């Protein structure tokens, strides 16, 4: 079937990996499939499928690389296809698409030729608070709708569709081939009506006989509280319109939530990193802490240690299924050591140390000798370097968490 080089057909290099071949095939197949009204190309799609079937098989690819298509034919595969794959066994291109993708790109077609439209995807970005509490957003989409000139028939004005004489309106014909081994039959799309079951004498100029045109549409979306990245919202009947009067597909809105500079979300739980002063940690007290709903009072117990986690009940994200319920906010406390002290503050800290029996210096009589001191200094510096490296990891993680 394919006359061009298989690598050229797929658009990959001769050293391409299997994953690269598979990824490229899926992307190109979606563009070339005949049901894609914008870029569909039946002959190119068949050629693409043939090339993929060969290059995705290690054995067939090896034969093709050495001997070309002729080598594949000698090996028992017709036009590059081995005995484990035969395109004639598929009734239409929709079945070929389903074979590779696990689902047909075509809409569901009824006996009258009516075909459901394709579903569409829209990616919506929200900020942290919009996702938490819900929001109304206006979006613009482009979807297929019935051509206003031909009312979806595909025929020019005054030219009504008639039953296809070749297939009797079934859209498919049976072809019988005689061989040395007997007669073989296969069912294929009717070449006269392209599987539609009806024909028009003259095609509509606006839609080129497709019966559908891509049109712009604005939609008002109500985003519920509690959505998160990966949430999917279905908007019924806003996908592509169906052919021959078929029902339209649906629109699926996929949500992406931007990170917050202070809050980190984990389901319905919100995490916040909060600094406290040394006096607050030692003596305890009250402080105002940011939540997604505004500032709230938080009680700090005396003797609080750095790394303590306090829970603020009901200050997290609303539950998607029941927005009246909310998760919690976890406040991760760390003690902030002052770096600039006035003379008075230094004196106060010195008195505190003295009251605790703590000496901030080592007496001369207890200090090590010069060599030992130097060794101790070296050891201390080395130890400090390791500690700094470990602290840097946690600091980096904390910084990343707070972004």
Image (tube, rainbow, N blue to C red):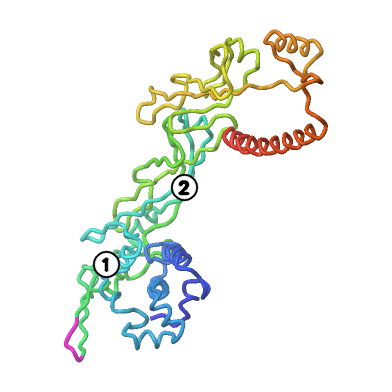
Return the x and y of residue 382 as percentages of the image width and height: 71, 38
Q: Position of residue 117 (x, y in %)?
A: 34, 54
Numbered mark located on residue 198 in the image: 1
Residue that appears at 43% across and 36% down: 221
Secondary structure under tag 1 reads: strand
The location of residue 317, given as percent across then percent down, is 45, 27
Say which residue label 2 marks.
141
Residue at the (42%, 26%) spot, across then down: 318
Q: Nearer the viewer, residue 304 or 108?
A: 304
The magenta segment is 180-184
Q: Residues within 10 Å of mark 2 (few under 14, many from 20)?
A: some
**Residue in the image at 48% along x and 76% along y:** 7
Screen quadrant of the C terminus:
top right
Q: Which mark is residue 56?
A: none
Q: Residues within 10 Å of mark 1 (few under 14, many from 20)?
A: many
Looking at the image, is mark 1 or mark 2 earlier in the sequence? 2
């Amino acid at each position: 079937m394919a006359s061009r080089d298989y690598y050229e057909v797929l658009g990959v290099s001769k050293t391409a990996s299997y994953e690269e071949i598979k990824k490229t095939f899926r992307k190109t197949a979606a563009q070339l499939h005949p049901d894609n009204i914008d870029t569909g190309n039946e002959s190119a799609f068949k050629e693409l499928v043939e090339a993929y079937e060969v290059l995705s098989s290690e054995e067939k690819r090896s034969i093709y690389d050495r001997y070309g298509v002729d080598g594949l034919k000698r090996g028992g595969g017709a036009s590059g296809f081995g005995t484990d794959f035969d395109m004639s066994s598929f009734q239409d291109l929709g079945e070929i698409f389903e074979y590779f993708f696990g689902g047909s790109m075509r809409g569901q077609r009824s006996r009258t030729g009516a075909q459901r439209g394709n579903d569409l995807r829209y990616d919506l970005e929200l900020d942290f608070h919009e996702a938490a509490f819900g929001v109304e957003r206006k979006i613009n989409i482009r979807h297929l709708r019935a051509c206003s000139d031909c009312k979806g028939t595909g025929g020019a004005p005054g030219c009504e569709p008639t039953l296809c004489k070749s297939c009797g309106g079934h859209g498919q014909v049976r072809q019988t081939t005689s061989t040395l081994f007997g007669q073989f039959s296969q069912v294929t799309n009717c070449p006269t009506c392209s599987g539609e079951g009806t024909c028009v004498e003259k095609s509509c100029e606006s839609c080129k006989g497709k019966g559908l045109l891509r049109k712009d549409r604005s939609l008002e979306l109500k985003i519920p509280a509690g959505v998160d990245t990966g949430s999917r919202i279905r908007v019924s009947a806003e996908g592509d319109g169906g052919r021959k009067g078929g029902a339209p597909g649906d629109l699926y809105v996929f949500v992406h939530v931007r990170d917050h500079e202070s809050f980190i979300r984990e389901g319905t739980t919100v995490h916040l990193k909060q600094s406290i002063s040394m006096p607050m940690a030692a003596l305890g007290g009250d402080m105002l802490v940011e939540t997604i709903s505004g500032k709230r009072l938080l009680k700090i117990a005396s003797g609080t240690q750095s790394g303590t986690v306090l829970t603020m009940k009901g200050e997290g994200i609303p539950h998607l299924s029941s927005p009246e319920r909310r998760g919690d906010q976890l406040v991760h406390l760390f003690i902030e050591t002052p770096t600039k002290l006035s003379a008075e503050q230094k004196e106060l800290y010195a008195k505190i140390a003295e009251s605790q029996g703590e000496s901030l210096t080592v007496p001369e009589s207890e200090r090590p000798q010069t060599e030992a001191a130097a060794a101790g200094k070296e050891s201390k510096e080395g130890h400090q370097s390791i500690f700094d490296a470990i602290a840097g990891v946690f600091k980096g993680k904390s910084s990343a968490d707070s972004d």
